[in-house]
């Protein structure tokens, strides 16, 4: 499966961005109903993965290993387990921060039976209509790179009633002619939103040595 990272700007080149000014915001998701009963007493990002890790470690390590050291984790449900796993030492010792407050984060209920669950406009990749129809497996990774002033303009002025980036904000930006680009990532990606997907992901980890994702700076 191929996946995409979407970038939105007002025309300013992203190459001018300094990593020191980049803020990583990790959305903790909703109640994780499709992973119940694993989410009965813990947040979805706190579910164990590969024996030594939690799902949140993948996202935090991706940020840190990409030199994004300012990180906020926004939680809504069962945050106690995640707060215990993400002590100040995990992030602050590497120059980052975490948010212990509560915010409203909507959990998109996506289904692979419906091809629309991918929520990405493949024409953004420069594909014509025919090639787009032949590549329905391209999925959005849910990673968005947005300049802060553009983000505020989109949420406050352009789409004040929008709640979801994949199904509302991104399609809205393309409809009004804003500059939206997608980066095609052909590495490993898995949507771990069901118990079966979590089981398969854990089995996949056993097929090769697992790096120390917390401290291996070359791992992304």
Image (spheres, helix red, strand yellow):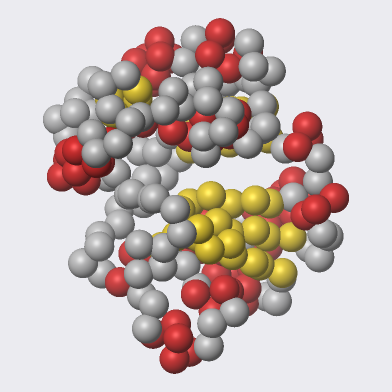
Rendered location of residue 195, percent (x, y): 17, 40
In the image, 157 versus 124, the foreground residue is 124
How many numbered markers are drawn?
0
Reply above or below: 27 against 81: below
Residue at the outermost bottom position: 130
Q: Is residue 146 left or right of residue 3?
A: right
Tell me if I can see residue 194 in this picture.
no
Q: Residue at x 33, y 31 (%)?
A: 209
Reply above or below: 217 against 27: above
Reply above or below: 139 against 21: below
Tell me if I can see residue 189 in this picture.
yes
Q: Is residue 58 left or right of residue 36?
A: right
Report the quarter where the N terminus lies: bottom left
Q: Is residue 213 left or right of residue 8?
A: left
Rendered location of residue 179, percent (x, y): 72, 69
Rendered location of residue 167, percent (x, y): 46, 63
Q: Residue at x 80, y 53 (%)?
A: 15
Q: Residue at x 30, y 71 (%)?
A: 115
Q: Residue at x 50, y 58 (%)?
A: 185
In the image, 215 versus 45, the foreground residue is 215
Q: Is residue 15 left or right of residue 47?
A: right
Reply above or below: 104 against 43: below
Residue 34 found in image quarter: top left
Rendered location of residue 166, percent (x, y): 48, 59
């Amino acid at each position: 499966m191929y996946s995409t990272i979407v970038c939105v700007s007002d025309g300013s080149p992203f190459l001018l961005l300094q990593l020191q000014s980049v803020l990583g915001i990790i959305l903790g998701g909703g109640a994780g109903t499709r992973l119940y009963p694993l989410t009965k007493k813990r947040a979805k990002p706190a579910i164990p993965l590969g024996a030594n890790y939690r799902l949140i470690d993948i996202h935090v390590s991706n940020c840190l290993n990409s030199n994004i050291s300012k990180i906020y984790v926004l939680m809504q449900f069962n945050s106690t387990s995640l707060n215990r796993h993400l002590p100040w030492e995990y992030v602050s010792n590497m120059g980052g921060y975490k948010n212990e407050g509560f915010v409203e984060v909507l959990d998109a209920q996506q289904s692979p039976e419906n091809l629309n669950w991918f929520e990405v406009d493949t024409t953004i990749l420069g594909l014509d209509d025919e090639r787009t129809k032949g590549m329905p497996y391209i999925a959005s990774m849910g990673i968005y790179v947005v300049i802060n002033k553009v983000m505020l303009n989109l949420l406050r002025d352009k789409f004040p009633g929008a709640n979801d980036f994949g199904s509302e904000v991104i399609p809205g930006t393309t409809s009004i002619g804003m500059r939206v680009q997608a980066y095609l990532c052909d590495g490993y990606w898995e949507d771990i939103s069901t118990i079966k997907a979590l089981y398969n992901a854990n089995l996949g980890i056993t097929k090769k040595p697992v790096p120390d994702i917390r401290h291996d700076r070359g791992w992304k």
